Amino acid sequence: MTSANLLTLKPGEINLQWIPIEWPLTPLGENKNPYLTGWQNKPCTPHEIANEIQGGECKAVGLISGPCYNEPYGHVWVDVDGPSVYQLVEEVSGHQFEQALPPTLTICSGKKGRERRLYRINKKDWDHFVRNKYVWHASAEKEKLEILWQKHQGVLMGSHPETDGYYTPEGLGFEWVLSIPYLPAWILEGIKDKNKKQGKPSTEQGRVVGPGFAINTRISLERDMQLAVEATWAMPPEAADDYDIWIMAGQALHELDESLLDVWDDWSKQSDKYKPGECQRRWQSFSKGGGRSIGSLIHIAKENGWKPSENYKAMNVDDETLEHVSKVLEEIEEDMELTIEPERELVELKRADVNIQTKTKNKKGKDGSNVTRNASSDVIADLLLQMYRGNLLYSLPHGQFFLYEKEGKGLWSPMQKVEILGDIRDKLKEIKESGDLLPMGFSSRLMTDMSEHLQSALCFNGWYEGGDLLLFTNGILNVETRELLPFKREKYMTQQMPYDYDPAATCEDIVVWLKHTQYNNWQRAQVLRAWLRATLLGRYELQKFLEIVGPGKSGKSTYANLAVALVGKRNVYSTDFENLEKNRFEAAGYMGKKLLLFQDADRWGGSVSRLKAITGNDWIRSERKYQHENNEPFQFKGLVMITANEAIQTTDYTSGLARRRLTIPFDRPFTGSQKEQKELIKFNTKGEPQGEFAPLLPGLVNWLLDMSEDEMREYLMETNKKVEFFGKYAHVQNLRSNPILDWMEHKIVFDPGVKSCIGFLTGSASNQSYDNHTRWLYASYAEFCKRCNVHSMSRSRFEVVFLDICRNQLSLNVFNRRNSKGLLFFNVAVRESDGKYDNYPSIVTVASDKEKYEIEYGVKISVNRDARIEDQETVLETDEQYGSTPDPGPLSM
């Protein structure tokens, strides 16, 4: 690869744009740990990772190894863990290191001799991975080569707790993501050899059948590994001093899986006889079938009082129990699937907890009945409702709990599932400590039950969505009277401006900057002002989206950031066209936001149906991952802003998109030096605005509210008439973004009384013109596209779009009728069809000044909006009777 194609990651850098959208990701915390519950089975997209980063908990990004969704391949991480592993690789493979592990995406942590390389593996080879991790131990202590498959992840980018962060070596960066090589053959052969030596892990199969359901259970190697680790740490510390027990433990762990060396080594450190490296030396001498198994380990642990968990077992029981099983099935399966990384302290705590609960449960009165017992769940739920004091609601549209004043006064804020469970846990602890309702303590099951109780009791769908009130950090503003009202919970406001309202504040510097970006044209700056006012007040009914285009350093991002700071970063959702149009879960993200932002949008040539639905106040389906219930569709009651270097190019040329589009150029780039450049508006890691404009936000609110509602609507709905510049600019911009309109500007004239045939394409030679392209409309259009190197659309779609542009975008009296010879369009002609049209204005020019050309033509040229639909019919008579007929009605679509 050339140096121009290199995508080298710097230490600690996070660049989600380099990660393919189909890769299964998981966010990582400060210590490289995945923190999402069930992360192995709940991969995230790059956009979801971006939201986690914005939330502050995500410090790095991990790629989950194993099968890659529905792709015919999977990802395998090859982990080089120590300097001595390089020699090990060469010895095992028989090749030099760079030949043994060919170049691919390589992630380094900054520690010597540590790197991870990513490879692919064909679906046909997945069956060889009977274990999720394979290990080759090197000569140095705790240094090894690991092959990671399912239920593992490898860090792609982000921070490292002990170094400057993860990075990629030059030439081994993200330029490889589209051409990841396959796993070297010697590794696959080594895995097959290990399978022969260690055998295929045994599994226990079971089946539970009940009314309305049947469950197939499968208990795999991970369960046995977990039991083995717990049994090892359950043995007393002095057992590590007994040579026979010490050897037995090592052989049993080795028999189960070669990756358990570290467990044996850590357990052995309890003994005064411990020698560094001795466990590894012994481990490499062990062979398969040495006579010691997990049963030997469990036997010793039981002799010391340990009781293995039997939660995984399923037995034939009565129907009542089976009904209960069906309710808790999801929790049982999750417990079975997740592999616990055990620590000795956790195991001891678990053992102590079991003993305490057993004693409490077995405590009986003189009559043999239990003395202590937890209150029923409905009693606990009613007590929780009292403790929340009306400050908690469950939003049906969002599928989330909302808590009052969690993040700000007067504000109802959404809570993630883990947050509400944590809050419930804190309150259950209060109940346990303050009374006798929970003498037995509580489990995570009770927390989940309480969440479900609260959902059913606190359903709500009455959030404030108007624009007459604005919530600030010091009160609620009545927009019409400018009166600041006290906070009130019953206003149910979910959006807050993250600053105080100050009626005396000003923002002169912002006004001067806005005028500067528009070459000191006050009318152009007023359009920018009107848009910010509409964004602040949520005037979604305008059915407009703003498109800011221009070169770098022209102020596009500053204006977008100003809009974000104005309404608060938490009230903004950032996305891109690919996710908006293709990701069915994207809608749940921007529900309830004030602003949907496409910042630095890439060139997009696809469909914009979802964008039209959002800006057209259509009903939008809301789907959430891992939720089977379908939420009610919603209307997006915010505004849409796009910033880009060039206008978006789409396949939609109809009036449906054109009427919603407002394009404003930022074409005055900054020309000063780096020292002269200022930070006007930016955000810190908490999403708080900073920079010279940040203190001026209260003044900006006053300036925006000083503009009247009618004036705002005129600037946004009648922009081309209100501002002379935009009338000319919109004309040029429309021609650039719409090839049909461009063709009409160059090739079509408006002539009342004439008719033109739609025609067909004949004459297919690439170096020849289409037949009749000087007379037939479709042939003329196709010829124009060919010469402009633009793809042409089908004839049937052309009929619809051409009529739509004429009548709905240009508002001209153009109509069509079908006779025995085909479809005819009236009042339009191809310029080249008659020499008299050489000096005729184009049809687009005529539409721009109808009053002038109605005088010149002597007839009304505007479209008749009141024509009846029943007047539309197929014409079979001669063409002559329609030579100068006025429009009899709507279109033949």
Image: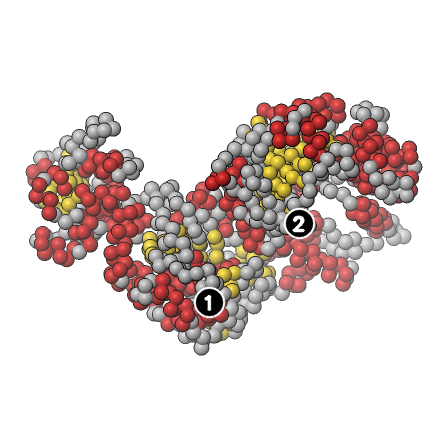
Compared with 749, 494 (above or below) is: below
In the rendering, at what x and y percent does residue 296 appear? 86, 31
Residue in the picture at 76% in, 59% down = 432
The secondary structure type at the circle numbered 1 is loop
Residue in the picture at 57% in, 52% down = 53
Q: Which residue is mark 2?
A: 163
- Label 1 to label 2, Cα distance in Å? 36 Å
Q: Nearer the viewer, mark 1 or mark 2?
A: 2
The secondary structure type at the circle numbered 2 is loop
In the rendering, at what x and y percent does residue 888 appear? 15, 46
Does residue 652 appear to the left or right of 746 in the view shown? right
Please state, as top left, top right, bottom left or bottom right, where the C terminus lies in the image: top left
Does residue 332 appear to the left or right of 762 in the view shown? right
Residue 869's tag is: none
Picture quarter containing residue 194? top right
Compared with 222, 453 (above or below) is: below
Residue in the picture at 74% in, 55% down = 375
Q: Earlier in the sequence, mark 1 or mark 2?
A: 2
Can residue 22 be seen in the rendering of this structure? no
Does residue 353 appear to the left or right of 777 in the view shown? right
Compared with 705, 625 (above or below) is: above
Can residue 183 be seen in the rendering of this structure? yes
Q: For mark 2, does the 10 Å Cα neighbourhood hold few (<14), some (14 to 19), or many (20 or more) residues?
A: few
**Amino acid type of disc 2?**
Thr
In the rendering, at what x and y percent does residue 436 appear? 78, 59
Q: Which residue is mark 1?
A: 693
Does residue 686 appear to the left or right of 226 in the view shown? left
**Amino acid type of disc 1?**
Phe
Residue in the picture at 82% in, 28% down = 285
In the rendering, at what x and y percent does residue 679 appear? 48, 63
Q: Nearer the viewer, residue 291 or 284?
A: 284
Q: For mark 1, does the 10 Å Cα neighbourhood hold few (<14), some (14 to 19), or many (20 or more) residues?
A: many
